[in-house]
Image (spheres, grey):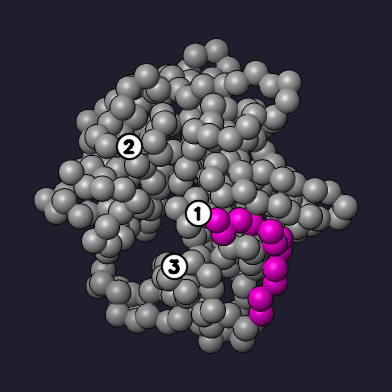
Amino acid sequence: MSIHAAILVLAAIASKVLEDTDRDGSIDTVTVFAEGLNIPSGIAVGHGGVWVASSPDILFLQDTDNDGKADTREVVVTGCGRFDTHELPNSLTWGPDGWLYGLNGVFNPSTIEQKKKHFDFSGAMFRIHAKTREFQIFCQGTSNPWGIAFDGEGSAFISACVIDHLWHLTETGSYRRQGGAYPPFTSILESIVKHKHQKSAYCGIHYFDSDAYPPEYCRHLSMGNIHGGCVNVDTLARVGSTYTATPGPDFLTANDAWFMPVAQKTGPRCARLVRPIPLLSGCGPRS
């Protein structure tokens, strides 16, 4: 079984492979790829295996006998916080530089030791080198971020909750925080929006650059609005070395108030895949 030819999803304690073996557009085979995980909150495929955020660890899992189940498990780094399950390490995403990027929330303090280096952080974007396993803090700040997207120029954007929802992040930057202390001697950077969408919780940002959809939905950023039951769209414009974003028409609005979109990907035939979570409660009250 090739994990590149299937869909990997995270459950509460396991990672599962979903396959459409007869190519009719519906999942007909489900295989448990890995069990014994702790609220897995991020997943990425690459370098011959699957990378999973399973706090306190970032794991690298491999299926060496091609039976669809992981039989090796490497702890790449450990020390990620487990203090707030809303803000666990998440959104593992390959960057244009070949590093694996991830996010951590401001109320989930983490401490990682690696090769005599000490990393003490909470709200941050981090990255891991796939070959050397080197861990770095890329930048710090924001709130409870869930979702990383890179545009065609390689710029990094994240979606976040409670405070402003859209941020352009650059290396070594220190961004406004929902809470917690700032590093000393830093100049605080702001978000790239002055508007708000429905509610205040966002997840699963995606830069959709396919021509399969109408122009108003192409080369824009879209993100799941988990309390608004919709997928919002923001349009980017360059402003010097950074960007500004303005609201576009929503990509979709569900007819179910409990629809909570948490992830988006560009799939086969340039289709957009949107994954909701089947929960009857989110991270805050529904009204």
Q: Amino acid at mark 1?
A: Asp
Q: Is residue 118 visible?
A: yes
**Lateral position of residue 235 relative to residue 100, left or right:** left
Q: Which residue is mark 1?
A: 84
Q: Is residue 98 visible?
A: no
- Image quadrant of residue 214? top left
Report the front residue among 219 and 71: 71
Report the front residue among 265 and 10: 10
Q: Amino acid at mark 3?
A: Leu
Which residue lies most toward the right here? 116
Q: Residue at x 30, y 34 (%)?
A: 233
Structural distance between the alpha carbons of marks 2 and 1 = 18 Å
Q: Residue at x 23, y 42 (%)?
A: 228
**Lateral position of residue 63 relative to residue 194, left or right:** right
Among the two numbered marks 2 and 1 on one chain, the one whose residue lies closer to the N terminus: 1
Q: Which residue is mark 2?
A: 200
Which residues, given as a range, are shown in magenta?
A: 72-84
Q: Which residue is mark 3?
A: 10
Among the two numbered marks 2 and 3 on one chain, the one whose residue lies closer to the N terminus: 3
For label 3, the SS is strand
User: Which label sits in the foreground, 2 or 1?
Assistant: 1
Q: Residue at x 73, y 21 (%)?
A: 185
User: Which label sits in the foreground, 2 or 3?
Assistant: 2
Instruction: Tell me residue 43's x, y (percent).
Output: 52, 61
Report the front residue among 111 and 180: 180
Q: With respect to residue 165, does 51 lie above or below? A: below
- Image quadrant of residue 281? bottom left
